[in-house]
Image (cartoon, rainbow, N blue to C red):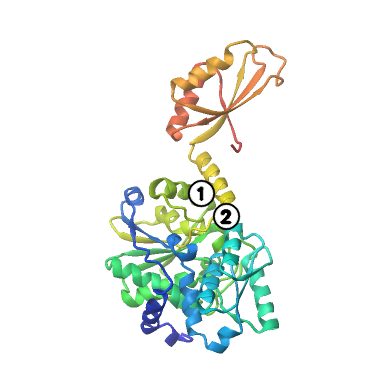
């Protein structure tokens, strides 16, 4: 394997000691909810609570420690969908050097503002990470900046791998580690170190179904680029994985699982309700993949890679999650155009503990005065079973309710 000597246990141990200087201790959290749901013992590695809100500070800081003074003085540059940006900005601030970050124009505002707040210069360019990276390379060549690649760098991957050191130190008998994959740096570091420490540990990489560049590359036996990516997991929306790290990952990763966006949406609700934590969509990949694992009574560590989610995205995810979980739904009924009918419908819903949150009343849908008014009712329910109870109650009273697919 090319440059195999660069990813050694000595390097990982060195990185482990270095990153302690800039990271918070993110101890494993035992999850009653996901343990009970899956029949395993599930532990969460909450890198969403890390400084800068993601694991990326680990690789960025370790990479910068390996640079010469001359390389640091030139100024640093990188491309990032957000979390690596903050990691590089924070690490550069620690060293007192300039950092320029190229971010896709679609990057959530919270990530842009936090990167600027750490003293970095932000350049917004391109629709996805890959286009931002091309711009960063161009600026690096033009101004002589030192590139700190977000994932295709063995030192960066080594820094990210310190997560595996912490997991295994805290839970030596861990059976599975689930880790999100975008470009592959985190998964490379975690899988390589995990296998060095205990070859029996299985490391599962998890990608969005709409950005499965690593899965396709492993199938092909070499790095391939996807024609496009489409996922709400912006932190892992990468078309092409890293070339340098690919040999390590292909040797050490045990399996790739892909997760559809709708599973991330409901996992966000589960995380907030059961653990009171905000985890961004990419960070939820590991827990969203749990239901696809065919195992019982295993100890599983899920890496929650980040928690940097802007409020607008969060509100949209919550809304869609409530709809998908049948916690909120809209029903249409036709009423006779006469006094008291609205009150009667409300009474039927109240009898089965439905909670009305919005009403739309339209008197002009029909000239038949026996069914002349359409009432659209948006309701809050406890879940699918309760929703069916409400629908049955309306049916019994002759309203013939019809579910309307709509946003809140």
Count of numbered circles on the image: 2
Secondary element at tag 1: helix
Drawn side of residue 239 relative to residue 187, left or right? right
| Helix, strand or loop status at disc 2 | loop
- Vertical order, 388 against 341 (above or below): below
- Give the quadrant of residue 26: bottom left
* Residue found 43% across the figure and 32% down from its top: 385
Percent position of residue 145, x then y = 63, 82
Quarter of the image with the C terminus in it: top right
Residue 39: where, in percent of width, then height? 31, 51
| Left or right: 180, with 17 as reference point | right
Which residue is more in the foreground, 182 or 346?
346
- Residue 396 in picture, x, y percent from top left: 49, 18
Choose between 257 and 43: the one closer to the eye.
43
Q: Position of residue 33 (x, y in %)?
A: 35, 48
Please report contact status of discs 1 and 2: CB closer than 8 Å, yes or no. Answer: yes
The residue wearing badge 2 is 232
> Does residue 166 lie above or below 294 as drawn?
below
Q: Tell me if mark 2 has few (under 14), some (14-19) or many (20+) residues whose alpha carbon lies within 10 angstroms of its own.
A: many
| Badge 1: residue crowd in 10 Å (few <14, some 14–19, many ≥20) | many
Q: Residue at x 36, y 80 (%)?
A: 13
Toward the viewer: 107 or 179? Answer: 107
- Whole-Å distance between the Cαs marked 1 and 2? 9 Å
Going from N to C along the chain, the mark reached first, 1 or 2, is: 2
Is residue 408 visible in the rendered image? The answer is: yes
Q: Nearer the viewer, residue 312 or 188?
A: 312
64 versus 254 height, above or below: below
> Residue 265: which disc?
1
Q: Is residue 175 above or below residue 189?
A: above
Inspect this view and state whether residue 201 appears. Answer: no
The residue that appears at 67% across and 16% down in the rendered structure is 372
């Amino acid at each position: 394997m090319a440059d195999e000597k660069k990813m050694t246990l000595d390097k990982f141990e060195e990185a482990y000691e270095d990153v302690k200087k800039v990271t918070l201790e993110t101890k494993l959290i035992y999850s009653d909810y996901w343990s009970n749901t899956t029949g395993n013992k599930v532990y969460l590695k909450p890198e969403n609570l890390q400084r800068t809100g993601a694991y990326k500070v680990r690789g960025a800081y370790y990479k910068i420690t390996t640079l010469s003074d001359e390389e640091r003085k030139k100024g640093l540059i990188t491309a990032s969908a957000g979390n690596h940006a903050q990691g590089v900005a924070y690490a550069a601030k620690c060293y007192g050097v300039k950092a320029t970050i190229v971010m896709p124009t679609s990057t959530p505002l919270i990530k842009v503002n936090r990167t600027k707040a750490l003293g970095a210069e932000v350049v917004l360019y391109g629709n996805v990470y890959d286009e931002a990276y091309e711009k960063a390379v161009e600026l690096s060549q033009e101004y002589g900046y030192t590139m700190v690649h977000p994932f295709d760098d063995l030192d960066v991957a080594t820094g990210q791998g310190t997560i595996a050191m912490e997991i295994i130190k805290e839970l030596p008998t861990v059976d599975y580690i689930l880790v999100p994959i975008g470009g592959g740096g985190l998964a490379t570091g975690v899988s390589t170190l995990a296998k060095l420490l205990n070859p029996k540990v299985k490391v599962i990489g998890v990608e969005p179904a709409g950005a499965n560049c690593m899965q396709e590359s492993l199938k092909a036996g070499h790095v391939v680029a996807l024609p496009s990516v489409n996922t709400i997991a912006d932190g892992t929306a990468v078309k092409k994985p890293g070339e340098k790290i690919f040999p390590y990952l292909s040797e050490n990763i045990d399996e790739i699982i892909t997760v559809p966006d709708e599973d991330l949406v409901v996992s966000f609700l589960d995380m907030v309700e059961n653990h009171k934590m905000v985890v961004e969509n990419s960070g939820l990949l590991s827990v969203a993949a749990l239901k696809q694992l065919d195992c019982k009574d295993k100890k599983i560590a899920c890496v929650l890679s980040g928690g940097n989610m802007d409020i607008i995205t969060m509100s949209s995810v919550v809304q869609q999650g409530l709809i998908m979980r049948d916690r909120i739904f809209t029903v249409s009924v036709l009423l006779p155009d006469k006094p008291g009918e609205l009150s009667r419908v409300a009474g039927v819903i109240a009898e089965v503990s439905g909670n009305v949150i919005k009403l739309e009343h339209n008197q002009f849908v029909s000239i038949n005065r026996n069914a002349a008014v359409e009432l659209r009712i948006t309701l809050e329910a406890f879940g699918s079973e309760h929703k069916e109870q409400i629908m049955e109650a309306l049916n019994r009273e002759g309203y013939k309710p019809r579910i309307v697919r709509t946003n809140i």
